[in-house]
Image (cartoon, rainbow, N blue to C red):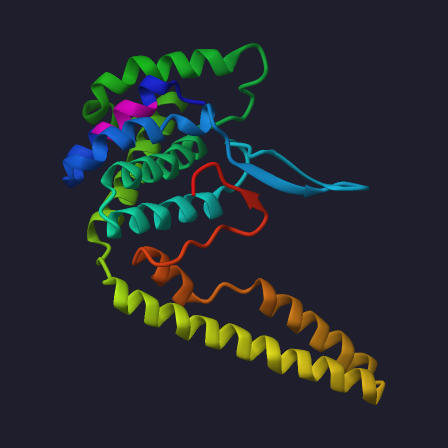
Amino acid sequence: MPSWRVHRVLALLAAREVGLPQGLIEGLLRGVVEPDVTPDKVLVAGRRRLYAKRARHHGVSNDALVEYYYNLACFYRARGDLYSAGRALGRAAHYLQDAAVKTRKWLIFDVHDEVEAEMGRLVGSLPHVCSRPAGDAAVSLCRAYADTVQLFRRFVSEPVVDRATGRRLLWRGRLKKWSAVAALGSALVASVFAALAWGLLASAAGLYLALRWTPGEYVAAMRAGVHRVVPLGYVTAME
């Protein structure tokens, strides 16, 4: 994975390029290295128990964590806590930057250390390097930078929704979710009494999905600073 210096330089350069508010920078520089120290965890079903293990940073998709921390950054910005907003945005950037690094064959013959060291040498000349990237380290570095810039541009352009609107959206989302749960629960009960096997399976599957469903209004309410939504299957280090 990139060194802390690389993570911080990428975040700082991207922040300057998009004009990220200055009040976020201190939290951003902490958050962009924090997942290596205070990790997020994934819930895993074992044979006898449910347990949490450290989320991997390479070779897997961490889109759920990126989106969660992006939404959390919006949540704290809406509440006026720019330090925490920057910290959450930094955690999101960390996962994007790690995902950009090619890990194929890095664990063989210590290639990982060589590529990481090369990224550290190249990051000081980032604009020039990305004009014509050559080699795994340069390609990974430039992709990490581009993804970070895109994330920060999205954050800067995200409209801030007022709290009153956020509360209305939250209640609308709850109404939608629990109306669906009630309807599917009724269908499940009806299928049991009617002894309809196919109806029982369909309504049970639908009820399970409805209970796990996160309406878009919940996310909008989170970005408005009203309600936090933790991704299913994760134990997040920051809330």
Number of marks drawn: 0
Question: Which region shows up in magenta?
Answer: 7-12
Tell me where residue 51 appears, x and y as whole percent: 68, 38
Instruction: Single out the residue that lies furthest toward the bottom.
Output: 194
The residue shown at (39%, 60%) is: 219
| Relative horizontal placement of residue 3, taking residue 27 as reference (left or right) | right
Considering only vertical position in the picture, is 150 above or below 177? above
Q: In which quarter of the image is residue 147?
A: top left
Residue 188 spot, x, y in % from top left: 73, 80
Q: In this view, does 53 lie to the left or right of 95?
A: right
In the figure, 205 relative to 9: above or below?
Answer: below
Q: In this view, does 214 lie above or below 46?
A: below
Name which residue lies at 45% across and 34% down: 99
- Residue 134 visible from this viewpoint: no
What residue do we see at 68% from left, 83% from top?
186
Of residues 26 and 156, the one drawn nearer to the viewer in this rendering: 26
Residue at the (28%, 32%) spot, across then down: 28
Q: Quadrant of the C terminus?
A: top left
The quadrant the N terminus occupies is top left
The residue furthest right is: 195
